């Protein structure tokens, strides 16, 4: 009986031997970090505002393309209206832009039309006594079976400047002589076609065609050249 008790005592001491390490403590496991909620996708940037293109400049009219130079700053010609009109003359230029003035007032840009009427206001500083006028040459005639007829004479010589010192640079004297409505019309006008003078020119056209009628009663001008 004592032997059994002794054996049990040895067994108890062996199980408690200090050479055996105590059981390791189990460290508590850290909870896994909760993932941060995903940020919502960035909204796309708003499109850049569309800047409207400036409107293109309006297309030039045929008249503007033909006459790109602004007219001179002078009054519009007066004294050209009347009750009786003869068929019109046309001032045409063979070169460049030509502004036409009568008595210092703007008539138009060649080609432009002008007519003899019973309401013309002649230049009182240019007396017309003898006919034909000194130094002038005939440049055209206009007639109408009911209204009458008139001749145009032009003096673009240096002598006109000496006789009429009030002429502006480049001006010549346009004489009118005719009968309108049974009344005599005679007088002088100051004519300016800038930088140009009357020339003799006959276009090569069919005399029976439309071009011929277009050039009826045309007074042609060309650039002044060194003479």
Image: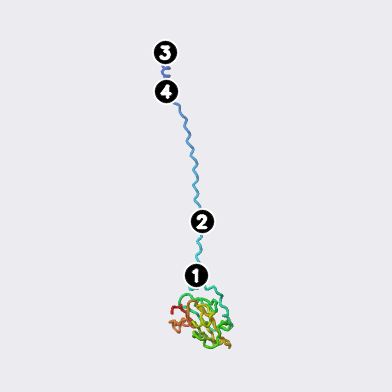
What residue do we see at 42% from left, 23% from top? 21
| Numbered mark located on residue 60 in the image | 1
Distance in Å between CA atoms under marks 1 and 3: 132 Å
Distance in Å between CA atoms under marks 3 and 2: 101 Å
Q: Between label 1 and label 3, give the one nearer the viewer.
A: 1
| Residue bearing mark 3 | 6
Q: Earlier in the sequence, mark 1 or mark 3?
A: 3
Image position, residue 39 (x, y; %): 50, 44
Question: Under tag 3, what secondary structure?
Answer: helix
Q: Quadrant of the C terminus?
A: bottom left
**Relative to 151, is 107 above or below?**
above
**Relative to 86, is 68 above or below?**
above
- Give 83 or 10, whichever is nearer the viewer: 83
| Residue bearing mark 2 | 49
Please say if the residues under marks 2 and 1 sit with CB atoms less than 8 Å apart. Answer: no
Question: Under tag 4, what secondary structure?
Answer: loop
Distance in Å between CA atoms under marks 2 and 4: 78 Å
| Residue bearing mark 4 | 21
Q: Between label 4 and label 1, give the one nearer the viewer.
A: 1
Image position, residue 194 (x, y; %): 49, 76
Q: Earlier in the sequence, mark 3 or mark 4?
A: 3
Question: Which residue, as the protein is rendered here, is positioned at the far top?
Answer: 2
């Amino acid at each position: 009986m004592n032997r059994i008790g002794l054996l049990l005592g040895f067994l108890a001491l062996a199980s408690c031997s200090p050479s055996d390490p105590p059981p390791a403590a189990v460290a508590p496991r850290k909870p896994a970090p909760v993932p941060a909620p995903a940020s919502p996708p960035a909204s796309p940037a708003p499109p850049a505002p569309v800047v409207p293109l400036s409107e293109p400049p309006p297309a030039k009219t045929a008249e503007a393309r033909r006459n790109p130079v602004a007219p001179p700053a002078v009054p519009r010609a007066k004294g050209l209206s009347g009750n009786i009109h003869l068929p019109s003359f046309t001032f045409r230029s063979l070169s460049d832009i030509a502004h036409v003035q009568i008595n210092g007032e703007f008539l138009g840009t060649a080609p432009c039309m002008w007519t003899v009427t019973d309401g013309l206001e002649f230049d009182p500083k240019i007396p017309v006594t003898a006919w034909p006028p000194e130094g002038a040459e005939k440049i055209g005639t206009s007639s109408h079976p009911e209204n009458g007829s008139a001749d145009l004479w032009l003096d673009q010589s240096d002598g006109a400047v000496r006789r009429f010192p009030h002429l502006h640079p480049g001006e010549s004297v346009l004489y009118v002589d005719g009968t309108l409505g049974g009344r005599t019309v005679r007088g002088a006008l100051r004519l300016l076609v800038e930088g140009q003078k009357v020339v003799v020119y006959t276009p090569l056209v069919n005399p029976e065609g439309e071009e011929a009628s277009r050039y009826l009663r045309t007074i042609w001008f060309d650039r002044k050249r060194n003479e």
